[in-house]
Amino acid sequence: MTEAEAGRTDRRSASPGGGGIRFEDVTVAYNGTVVLDSFSLEVAPGEVVALLGPSGSGKTTALRAVAGFVRPASGRVYAGGRDVTDLPPYKRGLGMVVQQYALFPHMRVEQNVAFGLKAQKVAKAQIPGRVAEALRMTGMSPFAQRYPRELSGGQQQRVAIARALAIQPSVLLLDEPLSALDAQLRSGMLAELARLHRELPDVSILYVTHDQIEALTLADRIAVMNDARLVEVGTARELYKRPGTEFAAGFVGNSNLLPVTVAECAPHADGSFRAAVRIGTQSQPVAATSAEAVAAGEARTLCLRPHLLELAAAEHHDNAFQARVTEVQWRGSSHRVFAEVHGHEVRLDANELRNPPGIGETVWFHFSAQDAVLIPGSGAALAEGGAR
Amino acid sequence: MSAVTELPPATPTAPGGRSGPAAANKARFSTAWLWSTPPILLLAAAFLYPLYLVVKQAIEGSPPDPANPFKVTTSFSDTLKDPGTRTVVKNTIEMAVYSTAGCLVLGFLLALIIAFVPFPGARAVSRFVDVFLSFPSFLITVSIMFLYGRVGMVNHIASSLTGGKHDTPIDFIEYSPWGIWLAELIYFTPFVMRPLLTAFSQLDSGQLEVAASLGARPGRVIRQVILPEALPALFAGGSLVLMLTMNEYGIVSFTGAKYQTLPVLIENFAKEQTNYAGACALAVINVVLSLALFAGYRVLLARMSGGRRAAVHA
Amino acid sequence: MLLYTRRAQRIAWAVFGFFFLLLFVLPFGILVLAAFTRQWNGAFPSSYTFSNITAAFHKDPLDGLETSLITAFVSSVIALAVGTWAALALDAMRNRGGKALIQTVFMLPIAVPSVVVGLALLVAFSQGPVLLNGTSTIVVMAHCILVTAYAFQQLSAAITRLDPAYEQAAASLGARPYYSLLRVKLPLLLPALTGSLALCFALSMGELGATAMVYTSHWTTLPLRIYALDDRGHQFVAAAVTAVMMTITLAVLLAISKIRTRANFR
């Protein structure tokens, strides 16, 4: 066991509860505008939770409330096993990485990484070892003597992470850490972050992003936010496969949202319910999955993922609905077909089609019942934007 | 009117009555006040209190002294009523307004060329402008005397051209306000150019190119694209120069012209006539004039930087 | 970017060159020329000499130079300290009234004529418990008051431009406010600090209005000596002393600008 690891273990055992983050009914307001509305969420020790939402949804405010740069008007914030609501930022001991990195331009990489240790008056003898360890983990050891301006964006990113890790925090706060990088570097850094978390399995990570791919790739759980509120929280898989709200369905992955009327509903073998629903006035009902029992005649929204729709032959259209093609896009390896059904646009993504339909043609869209999810709500709000 | 709201309250109000988790906030507020106190006290003792005494003496005037029958006795109203004072106040305002107008026109023109008609050495020129700001103002007067003075270079050339008919074809430096105006124009133009150059450097040159590609001639581009962007900087630079020219002492006193402005008269009253009450009265007038301008300047500055700050934090 | 024809560009440059040379370059040239002039009866000096320059380093002018350098150095260092302090206090202040108070108090000396600053000191310290009239202290004090305002203005502008992310990053790494002030904020402000030190020094070197009010015979700064020389008809010596003063000021500014650090390379 290295010295650094020993230090980390000590720290961990010293704080009962062993880290993690907990928001208890946190509300933040600026000049009367509520930017975070009674937000409650728990991040377990060692867990990665992504706060996913559009800009202005309150996700960065939530992160900054943990870091201590935003004071809640009400509610409590716990981090690293203690109530930090009234602690100044410098007493919280959390690692933070922001979008533009904020590396100190007048310090070498090494000095940047050592900054937190010196500020916290860590014994001088320990500092070089811990700096070297943080630089090794992020692969930045060869650049220790450089200044930030001499590094590329991706390297600066690594230094920012190394600097946050050097103080051995039990909680790491990442605020859109990859948004300043170009697409190619971003996917590389994403893999890097996943590897870092495997190397530091005890560190809780709160990851703020507006990018669903980052959230799906990295997070154990995703908390979807909108309009200063928590919309839905669940594992990445749950949210993707069984979204409980139209907003989550539209924001986590792509989806077609169609208003439907339930014809009948029965329990299914896997514990969920199977419902027969009618899309508009189509004569033939289709089967979909519901998390709860729904009475016949009730309105629901049907969520269909574009890549799980299939074009069906006219003579064989089990569990399918009819739609009129409005646009066909050829995208090299794939086709994207837009079609209209009862005034709503439906999108289909498929591998390159041998015989793509023509515009104006009427086609059958087939799907399997387990891939179609019923969501409460009328579907009107997102019917247009959801599929884009 | 927002000038009034910009001014601080007479006594610092305690930061109480805040909602939310006030305890920690309050502690932060009080340390902020604690930190601000020493520099404010220092300046208050060295500057604000003496300034208060000036106002006090101006209002009280100097009563006759039985022990010293030669002592000048003046009251505020005497000084105000004196036609000489009125002329000097008029001179001060006129000179400031004309100089500022000249600086704005020349400064805008020169900054425009530096920023948008780039030439090799444009950077060096703008560095020169920066250095120029750190030179004393009287230096300009000294050197334009050699140029345009009665026995200056230009006069010699002009009189040799006219065949010696006139001894001094150009004699505006010593005998008219034009010498002061010229010196102030030269000295204060860079004060207008600097904020303008900053504003121009932030202007997206794509805008100009798009405007030109849409068929706008340079005149229209200047009026409709550049000028609106430069307006805040022009206002800021202009009001600063208006204030500085109103307070200018070096240029006017070095010219030695018959043309007097308030600062020169104040010095004259205090140092040569030992008429302190009169000097204080003039000082109050001068301060009121330039404070009015200063308030305008601060409001403009706050509006400009406030806008930019808000944009950054959005 | 604005003019696309060669001809229009040439005209613009010609206009610029005309005004720039006539108004900004020519005065300097003439001043330097006059500094080396013995006699000037025609359009150009008829004979040249070095004696004006050597005179600038003798007796009165030399004494004035020393006085000016000491005054400028002491007052700009004090002004930088007080101005920086006030600018930092302004930044820490959250109360709007408090902010306005600090800003108004520290910007006021820019708005008040320098002659009035001198007069105020004269009125306040010629009587009462603290007698400073006729001392070098009152001269330094006048300079301090005038240049502190500029130091404050420059520093608070620089602090406003400073990205708060640096301080927040420092705080998140456990740096207390004073530690982050010392290790992060002040180093990042170093270019602004040296810049305003240079500005204060230059302004103090050239200060005339307030000094004219409070100077004494044993503490007479160089601009006042130049004024006296000019007044007594020694124009060429005055020009020489002015040129020497300009050169020395520039040399000091250059030296200060060499105190460049890593923060400059952002």
Image: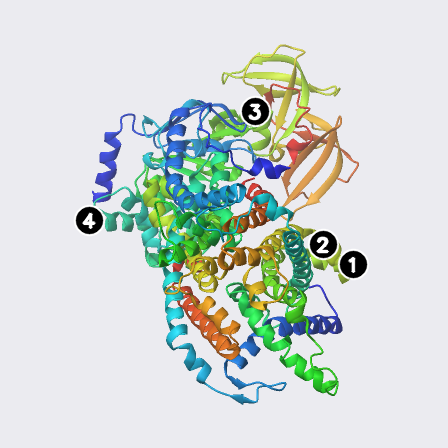
Q: Quadrant of the N terminus of chain C?
A: bottom right
CA gap, disc 3 and disc 4? 60 Å
The residue labelled by disc 4 is A125
Residue A164 location (% of width, % of height): 35, 43
Q: In which quarter of the image is the C terminus of chain C?
A: bottom left
Q: Mark 2 lies on which chain?
A: B
Above or below: residue A103 compared with residue C30: above
Above or below: residue C172 compared with residue A319: below
The residue mark sitting in front, 4 or 1, is: 1
- Is circle 2 on the same chain as circle 1? yes
First in sequence, mark 2 or 1: give its number: 1
Kindly identify which numbered label has been placed on residue A370: 3
Q: Please state which amino acid type lies under the numbered disc 1.
A: Ala
First in sequence, mark 3 or 4: give its number: 4
The residue mark sitting in front, 3 or 4, is: 4
Instruction: Indicate left or right for B294 with C147 as reference.
Output: right
Front residue of this view, candidates B295 and B93: B93
Q: Please state which amino acid type lies under the numbered disc 2.
A: Val
Residue B144 appears in the figure = yes
